[in-house]
Amino acid sequence: MSDDQTFSAADQAAYKYGFSSAVDAVTMGRGLTEEVVRAISAARHEPQFLLDFRLKAFRQFLKMEEPTWAAVDYPKIDFQAMSYYSAPRTKAEDKNKPTYNTLDEIDPEVLRTFEKLGISLDETKRLNNVAIDAVFDSTSVATTHQSKLFDAGVIFCSFGEAVHQFPALIERWLGSVVPIADNYYAALNSAVFSDGSFVYIPPYTRCPLELSTYFRINNTDAGQFERTLIIADVGAYVSYLEGCTAPKSSKHQLHAAVVELVTLDDAEIKYSTVQNWFAGDKETGEGGVYNFVTKRGACRGKRSKISWTQVETGSAITWKYPSCILLGDDSVGEFWSVALTNGKMQADTGTKMVHIGKNTKSRIVSKGISADQSSNVYRGLVKVFPKAENARNHTQCDSMLVGKQAIARTHPYIDVQNQSAQVEHEASTSTLSEEQLFYLRARGISQEDAIGAIVNGFCKDVLDVLPLEFAAEAQKLLALKLENSVG
Amino acid sequence: MSALAAPAMMSAKALARLRKPRTRGAFAPIDAAKRQLGLLAVSDSAGQARLFWLVDLTTSTIADARFLAFGDLPSHPIMDAFTESVRGRAVADACRLTAEQIEALLRDDPVTPAFGDLGLKPLAFLRDLQDRAEALLPTIVLLPKPVERQVYQRKREADQSDADKAWFKLSLLKKIARVDGVSSRVLGERLHADAKLSIEGLHDDFRIVVKLSGLAPEQVPTALQLIQDALRTEVHPDLVVEELSAEAKP
């Protein structure tokens, strides 16, 4: 990984979130050892069970090999060359001053950073019904609308806060969906994870606000290893959205997150992601975020439902397969995805639907757009266990190629062990060509609007299921990313 | 959070509290500091619930209480009934409340148990919670009162008075109609027919900004006071009437 370089003004305009903020932060030295794992735990004043969890994961991580099966090509990551903990300094660290856990205690520069990103943490300035947990490098700096959510019994807080306030709840569910030995990056995350969001929705409660977590990497030397745990109790419903950005840097940053969802009887979680990490230099491929994420939901209850919706437009390498384990009878899993790659980006992404309960249903709609010299791979698994009577799956996998050097591949895996199952897979590949654009432009439509119309038409199925507030943003983002890739 | 006591095994009272608890919520350190009370917040070891008590540290009395439950289904109505019972009690008294007393509050009739065959088993976590709360009390400190910032925040629904509820539920047009009706009548009755009023702003923090015309300048403060008094009597006791500032006038 090379040193930081200055990017041109044109580069800055292409990725408007690529600025970095001068924040007074506490950053641990580089390197990954057992002492570092212990130091992270100590810095966060964690209980013994969590330290044990981390150490077990770290020992497991040392035994594992970095996976090589994904269709992505990148130089071997030097895990000793990065820092695993960086947190903005807070007033709480000054022992002589009282702390009230209010916005006044946060570094104003951090607040300004989120304002610049369009995320206001000041509740009096709120414009819509969205509660936000803002994660800056390794820690959550603020969670908005907590009082209103608590009144509804909804717990929405940083993972660190949850560990201190609800330790038994964390101990019970942490690692229950993604065990520490699940994969290489899940083991790494389990050892060094810092903050993230925790959500619990009580029985028969519809969360009164949309919940959202915004992840910001600011320190270009530090990786981000957040953990998200969402539990929807009997008959509960929640819609959750995560967004993410990082500064532009010629260095690669590692983002290895773990997301665990649990739904009990009749509960539903709708999890949406708008991913916009810095994807590296378009021409040289220098810099950008390595996004190695493990996301999994367990539909434990009868008639429960988990729906993943994602719009991915950024990160140099994406390695992500949001999955559903359909344990409860009549449970439903959905995966709606748009993955856009351009420049030198590489994405190996898809989903897993594991049918275990009876009458379980799953639906996969994946739209891949690859432009320039990028590579976009859909990799999906549909597995029907022997006891999964009457399981149903429908997979629709569409790819769009923009330009002559882009690559799109599809690797569907289907493993059916029950004869009553009905599994369908359909796929298509199309191109966004100069002829199509010429046709639209000849009718007085601008280049930008023409690209937007074609891309939005292609992705309509997925954009339709995004929360309304973010669908418009996602549409603009997709058109913007493809602006210089066509013609 | 398990199959322990499915809704069918609960009394109607417990079920009603499960679906609509009365005292659910949480207090933050800033809430305690503002009210100059101590915040006692503790979770049980079995992961069933967390209580939040605002305690008057001079008398050890619980001034206000809330809870968050996240355990088995019965933990929600149990904590709701328990939290309602402890308000106004001394911490020591609250920690002596027995599982039988709380369970009795959740029964539909004196002889039928609230949780069927499970008896008092779902209430077992209360003892642990009470012990932890009692042990924590001596460590609670009073935070200094924070510097107040004049930022209006609408009351949470549970704290709203009848007047608040009647006012907040009105649409903006209905609010304007009510204010206009009362103001015009007062102006006509108490001043003279030429006086005219237009509503320039109707804010969530009870401020009403008006523009008066047809009055001598020295009459304006009196007119504003008369309108405000009438609105406070007939519409909402917190309403404040202000004249449109000179800078804002076209």
Image (cartoon, rainbow, N blue to C red):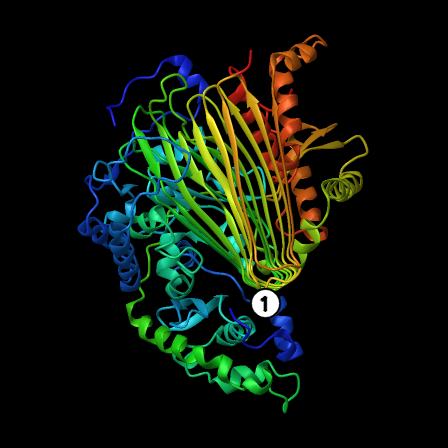
| Circle 1 residue | B21
Question: What chain letter is assigned to the residue under label 1?
Answer: B
Q: Where in the figure is residue B46, as x and y percent of width and height?
A: 41, 72
* The quadrant where residue B58 appears: bottom left
**Side of A332 where A120 appears, left or right:** left
Q: Where in the figure is residue A306, as x and y percent of width and height?
A: 57, 52
**Is A432 placed above or below B90 here?**
above
Q: Which amino acid type is marked by label 1? A: Pro
Work out whether residue A167 or residue A263 is closer to the camera in this orientation and state it. Answer: A263
**Side of A235 where A324 appears, left or right:** left
Counting other residues with Cα less than 10 Å from the Cα at mark 1, is it few (<14), some (14-19), or many (20 or more)? Answer: many
Quadrant, the N terminus of chain A: top left
Residue at the bottom extreme, as displayed: B111
- Is residue B229 at least partly visible in the picture? yes
Work out whether residue A261 or residue B152 is closer to the camera in this orientation and state it. Answer: A261
Q: Where in the figure is residue B142, as x and y percent of width and height?
A: 33, 61
Q: Where in the figure is residue A434, as x and y percent of width and height?
A: 61, 12
Work out whether residue B12 or residue A121 is closer to the camera in this orientation and state it. Answer: B12
**Is A425 placed above or below A385 here?**
above
**Is B155 placed above or below A30 here?**
below
* The quadrant where residue A428 appears: top right
Q: Residue at x 38, y 20 (%)?
A: A281
Quadrant, the C terminus of chain A: top right
- Is residue B241 at least partly visible in the picture? no
Work out whether residue A451 or residue A425 is closer to the camera in this orientation and state it. Answer: A425
SS class, disc 1: loop
